[in-house]
């Protein structure tokens, strides 16, 4: 059984890496192989694959969809640019790396990671020269750590929601435990990397270069949520060099979309949008999402306290809480930016959530097949809940899978699925396995990751520089995270 599980996982990795087969198809093939070789039979194997797919989507499908749609609304409303400008004013330039990584890993996790990176990278590059020595690597590292850690630890990050679904972790518990882990992890990891950079572990001549996207603006897009055309001809007046990262043209704070003059080619049709957006308090934009997350956390606290008031239980259900957040965000964006912006955001959200839902579902197929095959009873003989071995093993499995595959979500779900059957046998809290799998999946983000190349091109780093800020920085966060998680086994 153990050997067949290893073969199934390795075969999945080889199909993805060597033969470039789609991860969805590769995961299904691995699950089918394992089911047949484990003695589940044809019918049992098909039931495990299809049942696992449907079960996890039943648990987390709407949560992922609601979270992505809410993030798309905030993106279209230009909320990220305004939030960065606010953080710059409140925290000051020197505190921006820590404020950036904490905010990206928590509040902004409803936004699809690639979209969030494309929006925030130009802002980080513009701010970098203002934060002192080694500004670019510090901002790049803070952004990379915040992005990747938020995916696997913070609800409604797609990795965290998927892990909770695979392991049957209550979403409120995952939210609270993930928040406890992610905040110290990103702050400590960013501080460690800042120490290294200040000790000379960065050579601007070798580690920096001009952004490969020539039309990348030095600051936020003043055209608002519809985004200016990235064609260089349409942004000829936008300074994309590191030197163009000072205050806005009219003296306003860097990153403030409402104070920067409109560049040539951006058009004037949306000139009124920044003024309308400036009048809307930032808390109103993020308020509905924050209310939804607070309701989820409150539901977990009330459940732990044994309070079962029908109204509170209903509002604390994750699906209802995120639905409230989505409806509230839609209303705010619709009233301030118009129906067309809302419709565009809905279209973006559906396109982004489709691939996430399918990948999450097939991850559930493999996890269910492993569980039905009886791996938990076998591995349970070698572990006990009062040792660190199960958590360290799930961390190691996720780390190895991530090095091979390059996908944080796939490696985390697969590693969690392998040891999920162990949890009930030895009495280990499933939330700890979810957190350990997420921590391991952060190790060694490298050239197989789309995030790696986006950080390299958008922030003006060489490959060598990106290996330092992204690969090493997120790996440090991975190690810090498991060290934070291990003591939690005394609580859960």
Image (cartoon, rainbow, N blue to C red):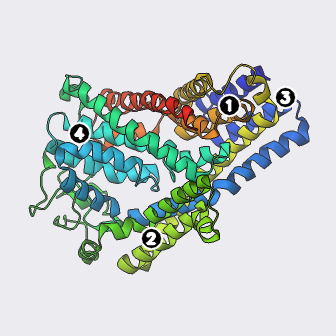
* Between marks 1 and 4 in the image, the one whose residue lies nearer the viewer: 1
Judge by depth and name the residue closer to the eye, 15 or 131: 131
Where is the N terminus found, in terms of image quarters? Answer: top right
Q: Residues within 10 Å of mark 4 (few under 14, many from 20)?
A: some
> Which residue is the site of mark 1?
419
Compare marks 2 and 1 and give the one earlier in the sequence: 2
Compare marks 3 and 4 and give the one earlier in the sequence: 3
- Cα separation between marks 2 and 1: 38 Å
Residue 324 as seen in the image, left or right of residue 473: right
Q: How crowded is mark 2: few (under 14 residues within 10 Å), some or many (20 or more)?
A: many
* Between marks 2 and 3 in the image, the one whose residue lies nearer the viewer: 2
- Cα separation between marks 2 and 3: 48 Å
Where is the C terminus found, in terms of image quarters? Answer: top right
Q: Position of residue 96 (x, y in %)?
A: 24, 46
Tell me if residue 183 comes above or below residue 204 in the rendering: below
- Cα separation between marks 1 and 4: 45 Å
Compare marks 2 and 3 and give the one earlier in the sequence: 3
Judge by depth and name the residue closer to the eye, 211 or 341: 341
Q: Where is residue 479 in the image (x, y as percent from the top left)?
A: 44, 27
Q: Which residue is drawn at 16% across and 58% down?
A: 237
Q: Where is residue 275 in the image (x, y as percent from the top left)?
A: 23, 75
Residue 473 as seen in the image, left or right of residue 374: left
Q: Is residue 85 visible?
A: yes
User: Residue 342 got which mark?
Assistant: none
Q: Give the structural element (helix, strand or loop) at label 4.
A: loop
Q: Give the structural element (helix, strand or loop) at label 3.
A: loop
> Which residue is the site of mark 4?
210
> Which residue is the site of mark 3?
38
Q: Looking at the rendering, which quadrant does residue 222 occupy?
A: bottom left
> Which residue is the site of mark 2?
329
């Amino acid at each position: 059984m153990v050997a067949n599980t290893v073969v199934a996982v390795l075969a999945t990795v080889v199909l993805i890496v060597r033969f470039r087969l789609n991860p969805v198809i590769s995961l299904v093939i691995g699950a089918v192989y394992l089911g047949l070789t484990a003695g589940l039979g044809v019918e049992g194997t098909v039931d495990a694959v299809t049942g696992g797919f449907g079960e996890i989507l039943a648990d987390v499908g709407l949560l992922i969809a609601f979270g992505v749609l809410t993030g798309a609304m905030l993106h279209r409303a230009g909320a990220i640019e305004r939030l960065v400008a606010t953080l710059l004013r409140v925290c000051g330039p020197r505190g921006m790396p820590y404020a950036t990584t904490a905010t990206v890993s928590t509040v902004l996790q409803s936004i699809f990671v690639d979209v969030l990176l494309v929006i925030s990278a130009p802002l980080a590059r513009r701010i970098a020269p203002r934060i002192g020595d080694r500004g670019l690597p510090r901002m790049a590292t803070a952004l990379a750590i915040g992005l990747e850690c938020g995916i696997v630890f913070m609800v409604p990050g797609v990795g965290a929601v998927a892990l909770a679904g695979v392991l049957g972790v209550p979403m409120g518990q995952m939210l609270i435990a993930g928040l406890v882990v992610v905040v110290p992890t990103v702050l400590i990891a960013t501080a460690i990397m800042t120490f290294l950079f200040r000790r000379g572990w960065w050579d601007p001549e070798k580690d920096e270069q001009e952004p490969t996207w020539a039309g990348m603006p030095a600051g936020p897009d003043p055209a608002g949520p519809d985004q200016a055309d990235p064609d260089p001809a349409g942004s000829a007046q936008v300074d994309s060099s590191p030197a163009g990262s000072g205050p806005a043209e009219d003296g306003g704070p860097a990153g403030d979309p409402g104070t920067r003059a409109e560049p040539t080619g951006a058009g004037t049709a949306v000139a009124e949008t920044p003024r309308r957006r400036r009048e809307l308090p930032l808390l109103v934009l993020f308020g509905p999402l924050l209310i939804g997350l607070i309701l989820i956390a409150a539901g977990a606290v009330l459940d732990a306290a044994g309070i079962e008031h029908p109204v509170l239980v209903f509002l604390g259900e994750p699906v209802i809480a995120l639905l409230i957040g989505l409806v509230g965000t839609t209303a705010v964006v619709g009233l301030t930016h118009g129906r067309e912006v809302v419709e565009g955001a809905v279209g973006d959200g559906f396109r982004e959530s489709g691939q996430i839902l399918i990948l999450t579902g097939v991850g559930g197929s493999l996890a269910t097949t492993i569980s039905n095959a009886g791996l938990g009873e076998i591995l349970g003989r070698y572990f006990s809940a009062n040792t660190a071995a199960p958590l360290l093993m799930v961390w190691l499995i996720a780390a190895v899978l991530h090095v091979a595959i390059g996908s944080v979500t796939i490696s985390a779900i697969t590693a969690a699925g392998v040891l999920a059957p162990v949890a009930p046998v030895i009495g280990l809290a499933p939330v700890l396995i979810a957190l350990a799998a997420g921590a391991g999946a952060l190790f060694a983000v490298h050239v197989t990751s789309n995030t790696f190349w986006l950080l390299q091109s958008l922030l003006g780093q060489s490959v060598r520089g990106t290996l330092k800020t992204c690969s090493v920085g997120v790996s440090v966060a991975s190690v810090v995270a498991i060290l934070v998680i291990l003591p939690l086994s005394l609580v859960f």
